[in-house]
Structure formats: C-alpha cells, structure tokens
Image (tube, rainbow, N blue to C red):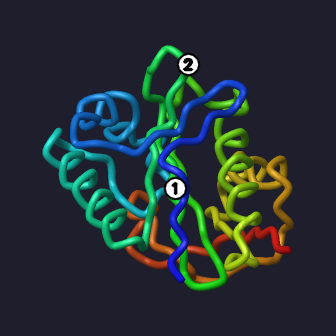
Amino acid sequence: MAVTPPATFRTRSLLLRPVTLDDAEAIFTAYAQDPEVTRYLIWSPHRHLGDTRVFLQRCLDRREAGTEFTWAICLPDGTLIGTFALRVDGHKANTGYGIARPHWGKGYATEALQAVVNWALQQPEIYRVWATCDCENPASARVMEKAGMTYEGILRRWLIHPQAGSTPRDCLCYSIVK
C-alpha cells in the first residue's frame, strides 16, 4: 500500500505546503542560486530561473508518482524560506531540506523535520526515517540530532556534492525508528 502524506503540515512557526511551479522565483531568489546554501546539496546552484523550474517540475512529477513529496517551507506570512522532501521506499523514508541563509540558526529546519518525522512514524508501513549530511556539515547533523534522530555512522563515499568536487564524499547517517 502506498503511503501518501498530508498536503500540508502546520507547526508552531511554519507552514509546509506542496511546491508549485509558481514558487520558482521565490525558491531561486531565496536559496537555489546561493552557493553557500547549496554547498552540501546534491545539485549545483541554479544559474537561471529555468533551472528552478526544471527542479520544481521534477518535484511535481515525483509527487504524482508517489515516490517523493516536496513541500515549500513557509513562514506564517507566506514567505517561502526553503523546501523539504520526503522520499518513501517501502518501510523506510529519507528526508532532505534546504533553508535560505537568512533563516539559518532559527530552528526552522528542525521544526520541519520533526513534523514530518512524527507523521511518518505514525504510519503503520514506515519503520525507519533517515537522512544524511556531508561530514563537513555539522549544522545539518545538529538539526537531525535536535529532531530526535540517532547517529548511525559514516557512509563512506556516499554522495557527490558538486560544489565540493566530482568524487563521492563521506556522509554522516542519522535515523529514527519505531
């Protein structure tokens, strides 16, 4: 049976809602073109608004297929500050997120992660939620720890972060299970 998350999540400080093609300019401006934000992501900074549109279409296609769910992370006033993705694979799901630099250190990534993890672990089909981050990205590791995830170890040569080079990099792996 396929797991389908709710369209939106509301937390104390945030609204997570499905991304739309209309979000392209806000995402591009907020963080997608920022090399510091995308430093440890699996894609390079977007050079043109069209790159962001391609990204969003891919998000929409994957939502339709039921393989990945991407939400815009918004403040109560509707300002888009990032995106959050959940990829469901049988009994497990993994997550990823990106937050605009002016909003780093305010607990928003942790708040979004906790909301989605809490929902996922309430689903009978999901037993494990996990995420990784580059070994040189302690801020992301701290987000996962604050969200209740447990450090599992280092995944050697796990992901390519294009801004760090073309070879796979070591990543820290965190999870929470039921």
**Where does label 1 land, which residue?**
40
Amino acid at dot 1: Tyr
Q: Mark 2 points at which residue?
A: 76
Looking at the picture, does residue 125 appear above or below residue 17?
below
**Residue 166 falls in image quadrant:** bottom left
Asked if one can make out residue 32 in the rendered structure from this viewpoint, the answer is: yes
The amino acid type found where label 2 is placed reads Pro
Which x, y percent locates residue 173?
A: 72, 72
Classed neighbour count for the residue bearing mark 2: other residues with Cα under 10 Å, few (<14), some (14–19), many (≥20): few
- How many numbered marks are there? 2
Residue 15 against residue 19 in the figure, above or below:
above
Residue 3 place in picture, x, y as percent: 55, 72
Q: Residue visible at 54% across and 83% down? A: 1
Residue pictured at 22% horizontal, 35% vertical: 22
Question: What element does badge 2 sit on?
Answer: loop
- Picture quarter containing residue 42? bottom left
Of residues 142 and 167, the one nearer the viewer is 142
Would residue 57 appear left or right of 147 to someone viewing this image? left
